[in-house]
Amino acid sequence: MAQFTQADLVYQGAFKVPSGNPGGGGQGDAYAYAQGPIEYNPANNSLYIVGHLYDQRVAEIAIPVVVNTTTLAQLNAATVIQNLIDPLEGQRNEVNLTNSNNQLGGLLIYNGELHVTAFTFYDAAPSAIKSHFKRPLNLSTTGQVVGAVRVNGAIGPGFVDGYMCQVPAAHQAAFGKPALTGNSSLNIVTRTSHGPGVFGFDPGDVGVTEPVTTTDLVYYDSLHTTLGAWNATSLVWNSSAIIKGILFPEGYDSVLFFGRQGIGPFCYGTGTECGDPAYSAKGNHAYPYAHQVWSYDVADLAAVKAGTSNPWEPLPTVWNFDLPFQTVSRELGGVAYDSTNNLVYLLQKSSGGGGYPLIHVFEIAGAPPAENATISRSLATVRAGETNTVTWADIGTPTVGDLVGLFTAGLGNDNPLEWFYLNNTKVAPGSPVGAAGNFAFTIPRRMRSGTYEFRLLIEIDGSNTLLATSASFTVQGKKTIVRL
């Protein structure tokens, strides 16, 4: 598989969040200040979205037809499926029992449940301990919130209490977990990662074990500021960065973090003192700002998980990008991913001219890079009725339809002489077997002597697509008798 590049994201257009006040109450029932994060729900072709900063409510909105335009009035508005509601039913502050300034940091749909993280906005002590919750997808269901739960007992919650995403099946073995959770660049930077940070975790462990175990993948603590000092002028990272989402695209060897970076001179002070028209408050400034992606090679993160590298050693590739209807702050509110249709959603927290927040849509260009899968056999000669071990590796995106077929050279991929799914049965497994493995393939006793080959295939809608072909081998089978 290949590294993801900026050219792989192709802009498709945008849409508005719902207008007006669908909930009928105060600002907490309106979408005008929706801040994210967001999460894609394939069941409804919709997005879960966090609303106003003060209320921290979550809604589900239907995705309308996307329009590519530079005129705000031409954009369609999303409609409401589930209106804004407190997803944690008053339990958000359980992440920090001594500080009530807690915000939602990430949303993730996993196994039919909505997972939620929360973090303390300003935690000088620090005193936050826990971070993760889960609940039903139906926001009207009450009494079933699980959490707050501590994740990773060896490191503070400021490293894990933000963005989340699933790990593609092809990389779960290397990462050791089915999902990712992380955070970065919070206020009081000593409690969080000095740059993109993320850990592998199993959302199914939330409410089952505590602390939920994690695998280190990448982070930079205050003793290992590999990407630079918090107050440095930098095009890669400083504490003016705001990282709000993570994307692990199917078929690529890249993990992407989305946010904004101050690309001007670093300054600590008020907006006036630092010449920053985007923010007036005292704090970290590095005007002007740019939307930025930090891209990491999967192999570098897998090396950390394997223990052959330290979490602060991976280095990202970075690039900047622009969006229509820009504001000077360049703030994003979150990232969501539709892996089926290869679509990426970015929440822009406000649009030019004081407009409502917008959802921008990108398509991942074309199909994922071609498979580099391989298949081999153990024996060059085998008798009919015996076994020949087949070994496969490097399946980019394993599926339940992956199989091995036995063929005479020249026959089509839909006509194997014998075949088995990768679980060595004729019944498809409940989940993908994996990117690499092997089993003993039994050569049918009926086989005639000849030259054959194994093919690694993926079954889609009754048809087989070739992934790889083995070296040929000889079967010593039934002999053809010619009667004179």
Image: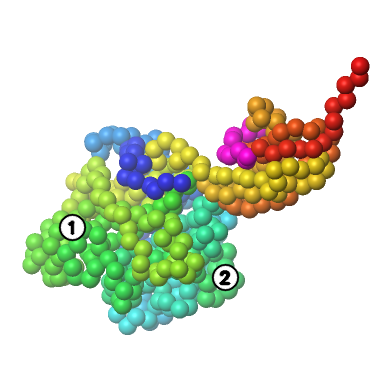
Which image quarter: residue 138? bottom right
Q: Residue at x 53, y 72 (%)?
A: 212
Mark 1 residue type:
Ile
Is residue 37 left or right of 201 when viewed as pictured? Answer: left
Pointer 1 local density, CA inside 10 Å: few below 14, some 14–19, many at least 20: many
Residue 325's label in the rendered image is none
Check the picture and name the quadrant holding the C terminus: top right
Asked whether 323 or 114 is in front, the reply is 323
Q: Which residue is mark 2?
A: 207
Mark positioned earlier in the residue sequence (2 or 1)? 2
Is residue 351 left or right of 415 when viewed as pictured? Answer: left
Q: Residue at x 25, y 44 (%)?
A: 323
Is residue 419 left or right of 62 when viewed as pictured? Answer: right
- Element carrying mark 2: loop
The single residue placed furthest to the top in the displayed view is 484
The answer to whether residue 452 is above or below residue 208 is: above
C-alpha span from label 2 to label 1 = 41 Å
> What is the magenta range?
462-471
The x and y percentages for residue 387 are 77, 47
